[in-house]
Amino acid sequence: MYSCKNLAQVYQPLAHELLNAAFMSVWAYLNPCEIDIFDLNESASNLVQALGDAIEAPNMPQEILHDLLNLVEFVEMHDKKIPIDIVKVGEQSRKAHALAKCLRCKESEFEVSERSERAFWKTSILAIKCAKWLQTLYYGYIHY
C-alpha cells in the first residue's frame, strides 16, 4: 500500500479503488486476533467510532456514503467484523438508496433476533424442566 501512495495522490481514481484494501490492512493490524470485537484497543475503538459517525453524518454526500457502506460490506465479506450497529447501517443504506445493502442488513437483523428468540425459548424450557424436577424432588422428600 505504501508504495502506491505517491501514485494514488496524483491519480485520484487509484486512491478510490485502494480504499477497501487499505482499510482492511489497517483493520487487520489494529484487530489481529479478533478474539472479541467488542473488546478493542483504543485505536481500533476510535476508528470504529469515527466510521460510525461518518456513516451517520446528516450532510454526507451520497458518493462518500456509498463508499463507506461498500467498505463495511467489503470487510464483512472477508470474514472480519466491525462492531457497528447493523440497524444504523441498514437505515443509512435505505437513505442512500442502496437497497441491496439495506436488505442484507435487515436479513442480518432478523437472523440475530431469531437466534436470540430461540435462545430465550430454550432457556425458558430448561427453567420449566428444572422447576418441575425441583417440585418432584420436593414432593418426593416430603412424602418420604
Image (cartoon, grey):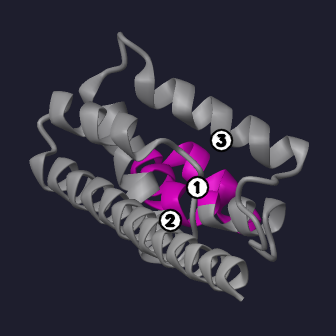
Marks 3 and 1 close (CB-CB < 8 Å): yes
State the CA–CA distance, disc 2 to disc 3.
Answer: 12 Å
Residue at 57 percent across and 73 percent down: it is 135
Marks 2 and 3 close (CB-CB < 8 Å): no
**Residue 113 or residue 102, whichever sits in front:** 113
> Residue 105 appears at what percent x and percent y?
27, 53
Amino acid type, callout 2: Val
Q: Is residue 23 left or right of residue 97?
A: right
Q: Which residue is denoted by mark 3 in the rendering?
A: 48
Q: Pointer 2: residues within 10 angstroms few (<14), some, or many (20+)?
A: some
**Residue 110 or residue 41, whichever sits in front:** 110
| Disc marking residue 82 | 1
Q: Which residue is denoted by mark 2 in the rendering?
A: 75
Q: Pointer 3: residues within 10 angstroms few (<14), some, or many (20+)?
A: some
State the CA–CA distance, disc 2 to disc 1.
Answer: 8 Å
Relative vertical location of residue 139 with respect to residue 102 in this rendering, above or below: below
Q: Earlier in the sequence, mark 3 or mark 1?
A: 3
Amino acid type, callout 1: Ile
Residue at 59 percent across and 44 percent down: it is 9
Asked if residue 79 lies in the magenta stretch, the reply is no
Q: Which span of residues is magenta-colored? A: 1-23
> Residue 117 appears at what percent x and percent y?
35, 61
Quadrant (top left, top right, bottom left, bottom right) of the N terminus: bottom right
State the CA–CA distance, disc 3 to disc 1.
Answer: 7 Å
**Residue 83 or residue 100, whichever sits in front:** 83
Q: Is residue 90 left or right of residue 67?
A: left
